[in-house]
Image (tube, helix red, strand yellow):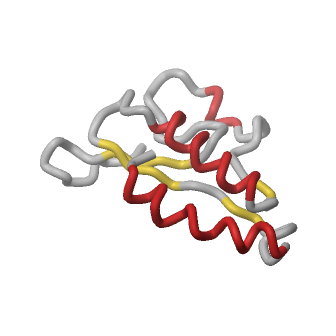
Amino acid sequence: MCSQLRNFLDPTTQLGLSGALVGKGGSVFVSTATQRGGQETTIQSFHTTRFHQRMIVVGVPYSEQRLLNMDENRRFSLWGNDSGAGGDGAATQRK
């Protein structure tokens, strides 16, 4: 996770301590310019924050059959959704 996002999230600790986020659902959406750009690692580090806030982390369940399709690259995982962008920042076409 980039330092700017961490600096934005750190003050939300008080929300977790006060119980304001208990039972609320939270997920993460990331974007990258490469296929293996650390998307899952970024999502997992964000989930750590959600756990500290006492939120319910929501991801893509194993029951999602498209996770099992290895014929083409899919832009999501069990950890959360992501989008891809080319090196120029233009969105890649999803299948």
Query: Where's residue 35, x and y in %?
Result: 35, 31
Query: Is residue 81 shown above or below 79?
Result: below
- Quadrant for residue 76, please give it: top right
Q: For the point 75% across and 42% down, which residue is it?
A: 61
In this rendering, would 69 be left or right of 74? right
In the image shown, does 84 or 64 lie closer to the viewer? 84
Against 73, residue 82 (above or below) is below
Q: Is residue 95 left or right of residue 15?
A: left
| Furthest residue in direction left, as rendered | 88
Where's the C terminus, which quadrant? top left
Q: Is residue 36 above or below residue 24?
A: above
Q: Residue at x 56, y 62 (%)?
A: 10
Instruction: Give how far across and how far down residue 19 sits, in percent.
Output: 85, 73
Q: Residue at x 85, y 68 (%)?
A: 22
Where's residue 64, x and y in %? 71, 41
Q: Nearer the viewer, residue 57 or 19?
A: 19
36 vs 19, left or right, is: left
The number of numbered discs placed on residues in the rendered structure image is 0
Quarter holding the N terminus is: top left
Residue 43 occupies quadrant:
top right
Q: Residue furthest top?
A: 70
Residue 12 picture location, percent across and down = 63, 69
